[in-house]
Structures are given as C-alpha cells and as structure tokens.
Image (tube, rainbow, N blue to C red):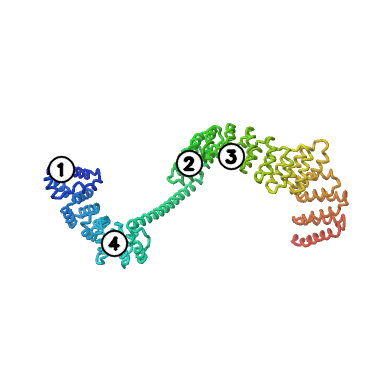
Amino acid sequence: MGLTLQVAGRRLLVIGCVLWVIVFLNLLPITYYLLPITCQFDSDTFAKTGTNDEMAKKIEEWIEQLYADDPAVSRSAAISLLALGQDSYVKLLIDILKDTRNDNVRISIMNAFGFNGDDRALELIIELLDSENDAVKTTASETLGKLKTRMAIEKMSAAMLKKDRSLSSRILLIQALGNVRNREAVEPLIRIMESDEKALQVVAKEALERITKQSIGNDVKQWTEWWNRNKIKTREQWLEDIVEKLESKIKQLEGQLETLHKEFAQKTINLLELRIENGDFKPLLEGMKSEYPEVRTFSTKKLVNFKDPAVVQALITVLSDMQMEVRVAAAHGLGELGNETVVEPLITALQDEEMEVREAAAKALGRLGLPKSVDALISVLDSPESKLTATSAEALGQIGDNRAVEPLINLLSHKDPKVRESATFALGRLKDIRGIGPLIKTLDDQDERIRWFAADSLGKIGVVEAVEPLIKLLSDTSARVRESAAKALGQIKSEKAIEPLLKTLQDQDKRVAEQAADALVTIDYEKFETSDTLANKFYTSKDYKRTVQTLEKQIAKFSKLIGYEEKIWQSKLILARSYFYLKDWQKAEILYEELTKYFHNDAEIRIELAQCLRETKQYERVIELYATWMKEFSANSEAWWQGRLEVVSAFFEEGNSQRAKELIDNFRKEDPGLGGVNIKIKFNELEKRYTEMMPKEEG
C-alpha cells in the first residue's frame, strides 16, 4: 500500500513539475489555473511520498526569481508560490510585502494575490494604498479590485468609511469596490455619497454606476430609494437587471457609433464634392475604396457624370463590392456609360445574391440595348422573383430583338400582374405581328393596367385587326383604359374608328375626351364631308387648335381636286377665324387677304383683316385700306370710322401724338363730322389730349 502511494505521489510530482516548466516557458498560461491541483502538497504529503529534493530546489528558485529584473518572471514566481497553497509561503510573501526596500517585488506579489483572488494579504494591501510610490498605490487598488470575497468587500468598505484615512486612499478603495462589481458594496458607497468631500462623491457615483449600471446622478436620496427597492432581489434578478441595462447601453452606444459613422461619411462626401468641382474624377476613384459604404455609394453614383474608360473599368470592379448599394449604383452607372465590354460583367451580376443588384443589372442591359445580352435576359424570365422577371421583360423590349417575342408572349399568362404588364409593354416596343393575337386577348385581362398597356402596344404595332377590339374598349369601366384605346385608334388611323371616337368626345372624363379628339385629328379622311363635320364640331366647341389641324390637312388634300372650290373657300374662312381666335395674326392676315378677294362684299372679313393689321402694328397699311373701303363700301362707313379712331388711339398710346394729330386733321378735311356724333366726341377728346401735351413737348 505504501509503495502504491509513493508511486502515485511521484507521478503527481512529475506532472506538477512539467506544468511549472511550461509556465516558465510561457507556452501555456492557462496552467496557472491547474497549478493548485497538481502542486498542493503539505509536509505530511511529502512525508508520505518521500524526500523531494527537486521540488525544494524549484521552490528555492521561485523565491530567488521574486527579485528578478523582469516583472513577468517575478510575477510568475509569486503566482507559483501562492499556488502551493502552504501558509508558510503565504507568510513569506506577506513578509516581503512589508519590506519597503523593493517596491517592484511588492508590485509583483500584489499582482499574484490579485491573480489568484487571494485575500490573505488584504489588510496589508489596504495599507499600501498610502504608499509614497504611485505604482505601488495603483497596483494595490487594482489588486483589491480583484478580491471578490465577502471578507474583502467588508474590510475595504470599512476602511473606505474611516474618515481618518487619507483622501487618496479612500478614493482608491472606492475605485477598487467599483471594480469588484459586487452588490455588497452598494450600501457603503451610498453612505460615501453623503460625504462633504466632492472628490469622494464623484468617485463613489462612478463606482455605483459601474456596479448597478444605473445613471441616477449625485442625488443620494434617489440612490437610497433605488437601493431599498432593489436590495431584496435575488442574485439572478440582480444580474437580469444588469444585463438588461447593459443591453440598453449597448444599443445606445451602437446608435452613437452609427451617428458618428454617418457624420464622418458625410464629411468625407462633402470633401469629395469640393474636390470634383473642377471636373476631376480621380478623387471619386479614391472614394470607391473607402471603408464607408455611403462614401463608396456616393462615389459610384457620381462617376456616371464622367465618360472615361477608367470610370467604366472602376464601375466593373465595384460590381463585386461587399455593399449591396454600391453594386446597385455600379450597375446603373454601367447602363449609362457602358459599351459591349460591360455586357458580360452585367450578365454575371444577373446572378448576384441580392435581388436589387440583379434587377439593376437587368435594367442596365436594357438601357445598353445590345443584342448579345438577349439570351441571358431570356434565361432569367423564369425566375421565381417576379420583380426580376418583369424588369428583364422590359429590358428585352428596350433591346428590340425579336428572339424575345415568344418568351414574352408566354409571360402574358403569368400569375403576377406586374409581369404581364411588363411583357405587354415590351411586345408593343418590339412591334412584331406575332404579338397581335395574344395582345388582343390581353385586352380582356382583369387588371386595368394590363388592358391599358395592351391597347397602347396594339396602337404602336398599328394593325387594323386591332380596331374592333379597341373600339369595344372605348366603353371600358376604367378611364385610363378608354384613354389608351382612343390613343391607339388614333395611331392606327382607321376611318372605322371615327364614329366611336366622335361619341367619345362626350366622355365624362376630360382626359378621355381630349385623347379622342387628338385621335380624330390624326386620322386621314377619305371623304371631305367627314373632315368637314369634324372641323365644324371642333369649331363650334371653340376647340380652335384642333380646328386648325383638321382644316389644314383637309385644304392640303382637297384644294386641288375638282368640285371642292366653294367648300375649300368656306374651310379657309373658318381656318382664318380659327387663327384669329388663336391670335396667330400673321397666318390669319394672309388668309384674310385672299378671302377679301373671294368674299368681296363681306364687311366682317375686312373688319377682321383690319384688326390683324392693327395687332401687328401695320397702322399705315390699315389707314390706306380704310380709305379704300370708305369709297367702295360706304354702307359700312361707321365700322371704318371706328377702325380709324382705334388707329389714332394706338398712335397716341405709343407716343406718336404728332401722327395722331395729322390723321385727325386729314379726317376732318375729308368729313367735318368725323363719322358721326359719338365718334367725333372721341376724336375731340384725343385732340384735347394732344393740346395738353404740346407745352410739355416744347419744354
């Protein structure tokens, strides 16, 4: 039995020695925690295991190493001696602590007690808080902060509360208790808050905040009330409160960090904006390498304004940036600046892990409009993500390659309305006749936007097969659909749509009626009567602009045909008056000049011609015409005199009073009555104005 114990003891001793060697070689610091298990042998154990000269030798070596110049070696030796667990070595270390001749050794020993959480030198370490050596005082405080036993907290609290202790040592004790972070220290610290010493209050508040994670401030009453509410809580409840408070603090700090992050990023962006004002894009290339995603995104977006091969290459590079927003911006930029060299990188981006990037890549390929991307876009039409499918369909429409027709037709039955809408729109851009039948069927889709786009696409294709279905759509419940149908019928320009469109002029929705009117104007009419009816309808409703559009086409088409001369003159008269009401005086004047020759006895035409001349300030010309018309059409002399009065008034208003007076004198020679009592009164008033102005002009 004795032999067995002896063997066992030797094996344990070997293990212990190996571990100590490892400690000294700094290969396994964790062995510090294993040493108490492997090396705690008292004198009885040694007696049982036999004499151990090697262990004694090692202990002697550790004692010598306490005085090593290297603090790490000294500290390690002290830790090793404490780990032996024998009171004799603890007493040895305490005795050394009392020796004031070597503060470095004392520091190492205190670190060892702190490392092991050993409070057997507690009272001495408290006394060392009053050491003249600042390093010793600091180490003493730090060591006390690692002693978490009840006895340690009680003795530190008692020492802290002693008013006869130095202020500096009490402050260090408060800090140590704060580092212990034990609830047992709360009440003594609150008592310290009642001290008259401001320095103690400040440090005590900080220690309380460190232990409790509360931010109550300097109010002792509030701290006391809080403690009375919480001191009855269990340790678990206390820890839960602390964890909750810590989580709240972490969130607050994260928010502050995020704010700082954004501020720094924004300042960087502001600097970049200043640096690129002179047209230099190189700072943006630097910005694309920033650690801040906002800066990289900004730089990528701004580079679109610089058409340079280096920019394109840089955008290709950041298509693989870790930040999704940067990759999206790069894809958009390549769509604006790119050429054939960017197609493959964008096709690769169609497989990006983020949906937004895939969508941006599809849009970019559509904007580039290069046929080499068609197959790749077709391949993603069956994507489970409807948004990507819709975007790819629109891109195919932009490219305009007919390879996409059949795949797009297949999408007209897709379950997602947005996909059907995009496919419908794309087929309209392709204008392939294979899409006519499917698009006509789509006019019955339950989604109004799809009916709307279907009508629009059929209008772009422009085939007569779509006329009847589109006419039916003029009665759709949706005003937007009716508007789109009217526009499409105008694009197809079939006379079959005239009557339905005329009825649609009365649509309750103004936009629909306006679109119907526009459509009617675009149709080429084979019959004069049809265009004439339409022109009269526009004219009577005072839609002079469309009257002009209709009559100009009509006159151009029928003026040279036999049998339409009288009708054309009537159309010209309505056209002239439409110009007149639109205040297009020059065009109206030209037509009125012609019309006065054909409608020789029509005084109204001459009155309107005269107004056109007055509006264009051709006063002398209109005066000549009035003189001629006074002789040839004396029956309308009152109108001609009224016109003369208006010309004279115009001269006065424009500051040419001398010419106005000359005309009045000439008119009086011609007829002293000046066209009648009422008109003469007004001429006299103008003469009076002239007389009043004369002294001013002479002066």
C-beta proximity under 8 Å, tags 1 and 2: no
Q: Is residue 276 visible?
A: yes
Mark seen at residue 420? 3
Residue 117 position in % (x across, y down):
24, 54
Q: Which mark sits nearer the N-terminus, 3 or 1? A: 1
What amino acid type is highlighted by mark number 3?
Answer: Arg
Q: Which mark sits nearer the N-terminus, 4 or 2? A: 4
Q: Is residue 199 visible?
A: no
Q: CA distance from mark 1 to mark 2?
A: 65 Å
Marks 1 and 2: which is nearer the front? 1
Residue denoted by label 1: 10
Residue 376 sits above or below residue 15 on the image? above
> In front here: 244 or 675?
244
Image quadrant occupied by the N terminus: top left
What amino acid type is highlighted by mark number 1?
Answer: Arg
What amino acid type is highlighted by mark number 2?
Answer: Glu
Q: Which mark sits nearer the N-terminus, 3 or 4? A: 4
Marks 4 and 2: which is nearer the front? 2
**Viewed as shown, does residue 218 lie left or right of 128?**
right
SS at badge 4 = helix
Residue denoted by label 2: 354
| Mark 2, other Cα within 10 Å: few <14 / some 14–19 / many ≥20 | some
Mark seen at residue 171? 4
What amino acid type is highlighted by mark number 4?
Answer: Ile
Q: Which mark sits nearer the N-terminus, 4 or 1? A: 1
SS at badge 2 = loop
Q: CA distance from mark 3 to mark 1?
A: 86 Å
